[in-house]
Image (tube, grey):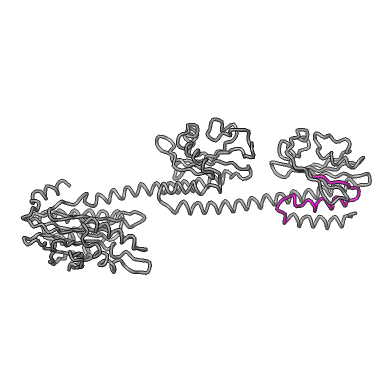
């Protein structure tokens, strides 16, 4: 028998067990044994109910027995609805033989104690269910004392269940926060639109849902862009639904910026590609649930994300989590879309700052290459051009404005077009650079730039005279026909620094099969992880291109520098001129033709 002091110790141990328990059922032994040791108590029966009411299980233990009887079921008992507590625990006292079997499934155990009475306490565990704890007592029992002990045990059980739910919510919240953080990292790690959309779908499955569909909002309605599912066969069906299903298209089209996550199940999915083909839960399946979240960023809707669930209800995410995930996905998608728009705009502007094509001239194989180095895609300041001149020569020019952005682009346009105009008129390169420097100073330009101009003039002996003027620009290189590398001598002050500057010319020559390579410092300053600059390997790499045409030389060097560098984000511009050895008498284009071609550009 157990007196009040012994009961107090048992209750203390029950509280300790409750603080460690991961499920309420683990408290059964610590609850049943002390109650059975109470004077006059012969049997303890516990029940667990879902809303309905639906009996989930019973557990009965009688005095003198060490093994409980456990009955797992899913029996709906409308008669038990009257026993369901609304709020506080409810204590009931009754004769066992007066119990109604339609409301008291415990009666089949309680009647094992003939003539006994029952003291029962029903109590809520959470919003979706309740429980009961009943004891059979004889006439010697202090029913008030038994009821008090039942209420105290129930207090511990309710507190234990509340703690378990709270710890579960905290664990779920921690897992959700970790998933959201990982999702943000994954989605923000790419600025490619298609890759970002695929990442959104992959991150969600199976952590959030069993299937996921992503749509972008276009002018003519939702556009399917990505889908994934834990099952390959269902993924194909999901992709088909995302592309062509009218029910889904209509649902998505009706979503707007203010909508929170919408959950659909049962009859709400009738006519949809997600409707269950048979009774809910048939064959061990869980009924399908679908949620739709609007992706809105910066005050506009960018699309929707649809999740498909085939899992227990307690594993469905809540609206707050879905809204947070949708917000992060929307920002990642919107950033990728904005980046894509900016990339197209920058590339378009960059194209307008460079010649659309190089002039065709007999004896010359001309080509160029331009590699954007800044991942943020600000407009660069590199430029190049090839300008036919009145004396039959061609002026090759390349330059680099300090910095990036709108101001650099403006100076790029000014520099290229100023030099082009002056050189087309026959102005010598040194004078052209001096006049550009004066124009920059008059405009109050706050950035400096480098440039080099090389005029190439075919001579009767089949060689070419190079006349080079440089304003602080890297020296051009010559790939000789035999594979040797020469450096074109040049030097001069940067443009835009001082008011009055003059530039000297230096002469060199090209033989048939030689290739002249002009470049900006983005090529030479590409740097490997160990600190090695591409400049140190450039002669060797260029020599290996002996015999290649101008296009291959330009594209290969740009590609090699981009592959070489682990750091450095400067643009790379190359202008390559290969002299094939045709003399003027062999058919150089007349000056009028060259000027006409230039005017058409």
Residue 78, visible in the rendered structure: yes
Residue 261 lies, in percent from the top left, at 54, 40
Specify the segment rendered in magenta: 19-46
Q: Is residue 23 magenta?
A: yes
Identity of the residue drawn at 48% across and 54% down: 185
**Residue 387, image quadrant:** bottom left
Residue 415 lies, in percent from the top left, at 20, 56
Q: Is residue 42 magenta?
A: yes
Task: Give the left or right position of residue 128, taking residue 44 as reference.
Answer: left
- Front residue (pair 136, 406): 136
Residue 272 lies, in percent from the top left, at 53, 32
**Residue 86, image quadrant:** top right
Identity of the residue drawn at 70% across and 49% down: 162
**Residue 489, image quadrant:** bottom left
Task: Give the left or right position of residue 473, taking residue 297 as reference.
Answer: left
Residue 301, visible in the rendered structure: no
Outermost residue on the top side: it is 271
Residue 43 lies, in percent from the top left, at 86, 46
Task: Give the left or right position of residue 280, taking residue 463 as reference.
Answer: right
- Front residue (pair 141, 369): 369
């Amino acid at each position: 028998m157990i007196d009040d002091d012994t009961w107090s110790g048992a209750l203390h141990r029950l509280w300790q067990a409750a603080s460690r328990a991961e499920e309420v059922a683990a408290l059964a032994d610590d609850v049943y044994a002390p109650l059975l040791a109470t004077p006059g108590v012969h049997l303890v029966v516990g029940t667990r109910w879902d809303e309905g009411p639906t009996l989930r299980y019973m557990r009965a233990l009688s005095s003198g027995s060490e093994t409980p009887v456990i009955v797992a079921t899913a029996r709906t008992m409308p008669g038990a609805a009257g026993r369901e507590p609304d709020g506080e625990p409810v204590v009931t006292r009754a004769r066992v033989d007066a119990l109604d079997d339609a409301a008291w499934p415990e009666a089949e155990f309680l009647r094992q104690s003939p003539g006994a009475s029952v003291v029962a306490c029903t109590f809520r565990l959470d919003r979706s269910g309740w429980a009961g704890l009943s004891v059979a007592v004889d006439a010697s029992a202090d029913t008030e004392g038994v009821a008090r002990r039942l209420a105290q045990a129930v207090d511990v059980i309710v507190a234990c269940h509340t703690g378990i739910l709270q710890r579960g919510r905290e664990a779920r919240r921690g897992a959700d926060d970790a998933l959201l953080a990982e999702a943000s990292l994954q989605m923000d790690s790419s600025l490619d639109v298609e890759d970002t959309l695929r990442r959104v779908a992959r991150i969600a499955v199976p952590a959030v849902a069993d299937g996921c569909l992503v749509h972008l909002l276009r002018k003519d309605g939702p556009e399917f862009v990505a889908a994934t599912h834990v099952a390959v066969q269902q993924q194909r069906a999901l992709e088909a639904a995302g592309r062509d299903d009218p029910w889904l298209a209509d649902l998505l089209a009706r979503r707007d910026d203010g909508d929170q996550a919408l959950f659909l199940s049962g009859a709400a999915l009738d006519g949809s590609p997600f409707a269950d083909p048979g009774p809910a839960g048939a064959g061990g399946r869980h009924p399908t649930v679908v949620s739709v979240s609007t992706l809105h960023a910066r005050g506009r809707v960018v699309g929707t994300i649809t999740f498909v669930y085939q899992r227990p209800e307690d594993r469905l995410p809540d609206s707050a989590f879905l809204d947070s995930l949708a917000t992060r996905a929307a920002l990642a998608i919107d950033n990728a879309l904005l980046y894509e728009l900016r990339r197209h705009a920058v590339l378009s502007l960059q194209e307008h700052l460079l010649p659309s094509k190089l002039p065709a001239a007999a004896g010359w194989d001309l080509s160029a290459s331009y590699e954007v180095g800044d991942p943020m895609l600000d407009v660069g300041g590199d430029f190049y051009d090839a300008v036919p001149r009145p004396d039959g020569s061609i002026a090759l020019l390349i330059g680099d404005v300090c910095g990036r952005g709108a101001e650099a682009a403006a100076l790029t346009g000014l520099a290229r077009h100023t030099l082009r105009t002056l050189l087309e008129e026959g102005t010598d390169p040194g004078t052209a650079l001096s006049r550009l420097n004066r124009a920059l100073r008059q405009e109050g330009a706050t950035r400096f730039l480098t440039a080099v101009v090389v005029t190439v003039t075919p001579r009767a002996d089949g060689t070419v005279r190079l006349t080079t003027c440089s304003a602080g620009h890297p020296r051009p290189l010559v790939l000789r026909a035999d594979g040797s590398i020469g450096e074109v001598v040049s030097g001069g002050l940067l443009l835009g620094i001082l008011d009055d500057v003059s530039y000297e010319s230096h002469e060199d020559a090209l033989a048939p099969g030689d290739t002249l390579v002009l470049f900006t410092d983005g090529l030479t300053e590409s740097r490997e992880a160990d600190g090695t600059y591409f400049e140190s390997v450039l002669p060797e790499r260029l020599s290996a291109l002996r015999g290649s045409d101008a296009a291959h030389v330009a594209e290969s060097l740009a590609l090699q520098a981009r592959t070489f560098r682990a750091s450095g984000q400067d643009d790379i511009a190359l202008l390559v001129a290969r002299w094939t050895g045709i003399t003027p008498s062999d058919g150089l284009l007349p000056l009028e033709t060259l000027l006409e071609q230039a005017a058409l550009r």
